[in-house]
Image (cartoon, grey):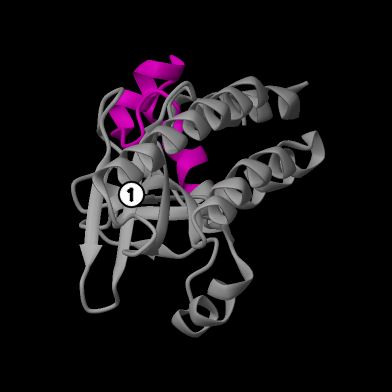
């Protein structure tokens, strides 16, 4: 019975990060209604295993290693395939790449990615893949804090690329965005760009519903 209670407490601490993604020890203790030493003991174990980390200011966060568990759960529920279909539809429609990102202390981490065959070789050379971190200043990162109906845009004249992204809502405690990157020629006119933004918003709604229902 003691072991079961320990597991329940550990899970309660992990769930608390869904409400506050960067809590202090005191904030976690209040959230789970456990003494500071008890919560710290669990955090130190999770830190040793690589699932949480803390910064110099005493704030804790989940690490990208937690994604391994999330991806496993998504695979088991068929959620990964459903999200992948939404991303692939965007990549195919705009002859480029489509990314699903989640907020990360260093910017945004790619948690889903698809591309057309024509893009695959170029992106392998660039070494961008699921798990890669894009810094602040990318459209995917810019879109994270935006409200409904808003979108982020970044142009890269040196490569003739344009990136668009919108926030994904409906996933409790998670800050997500979805975006496309394609050649400037594909989004040559304002009307084409607005159409792409509407397509992104439609897919963002679908992905939000899928992940929200999956509760992973």
Which of the pair 77/58 is nearer the observer?
Answer: 77
- Give the image location of residue 199, x and y in percent: 46, 36
Q: Quadrant of residue 21?
A: top left
Q: Position of residue 28 (x, y in %)?
A: 37, 26
Query: Which stretch is magenta?
Result: 18-45
Looking at this view, name the residue that lies furthest to the bottom: 125
Does the image show residue 142?
Answer: no
Q: Is residue 188 visible?
A: yes
For the point 40% across and 32% down, the residue is: 198
> Measured along the vertical axis of the image, is residue 159 above or below residue 145?
below
Q: Nearer the viewer, residue 102 or 153?
A: 153
Q: Answer whether residue 22 is magenta in the image.
A: yes
- The tally of labels here is 1
Location of the C terminus (image quadrant): top right
Helix or strand or loop: what does disc 1 sit on?
strand
The quadrant in which the N terminus is found is: top right
Give residue 214's quadrant in the image.
top right
Residue 15, image x and y in percent?
A: 52, 26
Main secondary structure found in the magenta portion:
helix
In the image, residue 166 lies in the stretch drawn in magenta: no
Residue 174 percent coordinates (x, y): 43, 32
- In the picture of the structure, the residue carrying the numbered disc 1 is 164
Left or right: 20, with 94 as reference point: left
125 or 9, nearer to the observer: 125
Instruction: Please determine whether, in this image, residue 160 is positioned above or below residue 89.
Output: below
The residue shown at (49%, 29%) is: 202
Q: On the rendered structure, is 208 left or right of 80?
A: left
User: Which residue occupies 52% across, 61% down?
Assistant: 95
Q: Residues within 10 Å of mark 1 (few under 14, many from 20)?
A: many
């Amino acid at each position: 019975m003691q072991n079961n209670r320990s597991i329940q407490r550990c899970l309660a601490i992990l769930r608390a990060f869904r409400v506050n993604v960067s809590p202090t020890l005191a904030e976690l203790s209040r959230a789970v209604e456990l003494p500071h030493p008890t919560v710290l003991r669990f955090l130190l174990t999770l830190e040793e295993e690589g699932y949480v980390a803390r910064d110099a200011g005493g704030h804790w966060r989940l690490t990208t290693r937690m994604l391994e568990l999330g991806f496993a759960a998504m695979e088991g529920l068929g959620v990964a395939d459903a999200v992948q279909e939404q991303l692939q539809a965007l990549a195919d429609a705009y002859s480029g790449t489509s990314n699903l990102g989640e907020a990360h202390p260093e910017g945004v981490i790619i948690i889903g990615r698809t591309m057309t065959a024509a893009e695959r070789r170029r992106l392998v050379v660039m070494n961008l893949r699921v798990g890669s971190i894009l810094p602040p200043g990318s459209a995917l990162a810019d879109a994270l804090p935006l409200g409904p109906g808003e979108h982020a845009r970044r142009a890269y004249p040196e490569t003739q690329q344009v990136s668009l992204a919108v926030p994904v809502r409906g996933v409790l405690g998670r800050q997500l965005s979805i975006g496309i990157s394609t050649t400037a020629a594909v989004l040559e006119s304002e009307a084409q760009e607005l159409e792409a933004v509407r397509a992104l918003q439609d897919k963002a709604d679908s992905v939000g519903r899928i992940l929200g229902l999956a509760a992973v």
